[in-house]
Image (spheres, grey):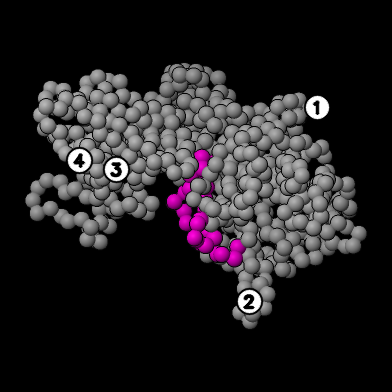
Amino acid sequence: MRGTSNRTEPRLLAVVGALLGALVASGCAAMPDSGGITRVELSQGSADKNLQARVYPVAPSRGAKPRELLTGFLDAVTADEGYDTARKYLTENAAAHWKPESGIRVYSSTTIPSGQDVTDADTTVTVPVSGQWVASVDEKHSFKLVFGQNNVSSDFTFVREKDEWRIDTLPPEVIMNETNFRNSFRQVERFFYTAPDPSAVASGNVGQEVLVADPIYLRRRIDPLTLAAQAVADGPSTWLSPVVRTAFPDGARVERVAIDDGRVAHVQIGGADLGEPMACRRMATQLFYTLADQGKGQVERLELKGQRGACTVGRGDEPPTGPGALAGPTPPMQYYQRADGSLVSTDEGRPGDPVRGVLGKPQSNTKPPLGAVAVSRSGTQAAAISEDGHQVYSVPLSDSAVAMGEPVLSSTAKGGDKEDGFASPSWDGRGDLWVVDRNKQSPRVMMVRGAKPYTVSVEGLTPGQTVHALKISSDGVRVALVVKSPGVAARSLVFGRVVHGGTPQAPTVTINGVRKAAPTLTDVASVSWAEADQLLVLGKEADRTQQLYFISTDGSQSTDTQLQSAESMTTVAASESRGDSLTQAPPVLAMGEVKQADGKPSETKAFRLVNHQWREASLIDKPKLFFYAG
């Protein structure tokens, strides 16, 4: 049964809410003249535009041929009523053993070849479904991109059962095209606690555990709250599990989830003893932030009940363990470096004041000229890299800091090359400083704890690939790396896990689990953590101008939020700091090269993104840098 069919999208049997109105208004759907259901086609981009269709499955018709049945089966697996109807397309044996929860294989589009119909003499027929494989979702609901041109084919074998054709063998994963996947599934953030660092000395917030986002994809309309809660109870993804832990015991079951008019979520679970108050609260906190994210901030408290014990938690509970708890004060302070080299703290309502200490004063001939600067999440310390990239200084932001002091790191990189030496200083929320040494002879990633430097092992890069820049998350267990490959000018984005080991006297640190992100980006200019699980990326796709993108740690690109950007941007900065709100985001900061109308050289200016509009920041002087703490 070979040939090519133009069919790549499913038949949708009903469309609800705004989508139906939009289709009728645009002339894409017609009201039926008589009873019955009108079939409607969903356009390729509808899911991306947040116009979601509710899909009702159709059972196999009598006498249907294999190709028609396969079309119906691929439609039925996208239905919003589970897989009961899809099982009717299978033989009794196949239906009994099929486990659609084992995973999903996402194709850019699905194609069923055309060909001659089967005859009455045929007893077995194999029909392939082909397409470009772009992503997978595993049994833990974790999303993973598939890179490269992966044109694959999956076979479905049909046999006759009770005089009707039925699918007898099929792939272990559910096959779904990308449009259907986006229509039927949505990204959900579930939360787990940071694993303890055996090399850290507990003081201040160093030993404080905080929640880390673990993104998954769940059905949009099939009991999403219960599914999300159960996904928390089931434990973290394979990728994140080495650096987090959960309060839930093995075998915990979520029996019911409901949200009342007072914005309190009520969760009933089994298989877990809630009699110990601290254990109950830790489980409830994981559930609260997971469900509060589902409700976009509409859940204020959560009550967790079991056969033995109950507890209640909310967003303002102490100590703060919510996502971004180590990101710094709220609202986050903004910083810029003036033309004279002095560092200034500011916010949206004032031009700013010089920071305390030596970094708040104009540079003089007695000081090393400074390049990149980064302020710690607490706002009490700053890292400064010398302009030639040879030294890294860690300087207190206090009146007692009257001199730069000795560098905490030195590089043997040759001078005169801006792509050589130290770059990209970044602080985690526990006070550790991270920096990249782009020394071409000996590239490395370094962590500075206190005043002591430690070399960070980076595992999983391709041969010859080097780290060009990095941004560490506030929780300190995930890192975004901008990497360069030999002979390639463009930069690409990968994510890694941060695994601490050793002892307080001899710490070790490794970045592993490296995975690619944002496959459509051909270059990455600047990155910044913007959400518990999202990175703000300034980059570009092939044959397009530079744009801003939100990229999740699973590598997927958000289509829900669009940001205006300009080709002239050089750097961007965002903040994870949210306080008690999951939906309130500080403005994005940017530096840009603005062309002058009179033909003069371009001028560097600072901007804030306010109400989806870029506005020039009113600062004391022309800035060299504009950024948030971290």
What residue would you read off at disc 4? 115
Q: Which tag is nearer the camera, tag 2 or tag 1?
A: 2
- Amino acid type assigned to the residue bearing label 4 in the image: Gly
Residue 270 visible in the picture: yes
Q: Quadrant of residue 502?
A: top right
Q: Which tag is nearer the camera, tag 4 or tag 1?
A: 4
Mark 1 lies on a secondary structure that is: loop
- Residue 513 location, x and y as percent? 59, 33
What residue would you read off at disc 2? 596
Magenta stretch bounds = 541-569
Q: Is residue 578 left or right of residue 417?
A: left
Please give the label number shown on residue 111.
3
Q: Nearer the viewer, residue 366 or 546?
A: 546
Q: How far apart are marks 4 and 1 (CA)?
A: 71 Å
Report the quarter where the N terminus lies.
top left
Mark 2 lies on a secondary structure that is: loop
Mark 4 lies on a secondary structure that is: loop
Residue at image point 67% right, 68% down: 604
Please tell me whether residue 76 is drawn above or below residue 378 in the rendered image. above
Residue at image point 34% right, 45% down: 109
Marks 3 and 2 close (CB-CB < 8 Å): no
What residue would you read off at disc 1? 505
Neighbor class of circle 3 (other Cα within 10 Å; few <14, some 14-19, many 20+) is many
Residue at image point 74% right, 61% down: 337
Residue situated furthest left in the rendering? 34
Verify whether residue 559 appears in magenta: yes
Mark 1 / mark 3, whichever is N-terminal: 3
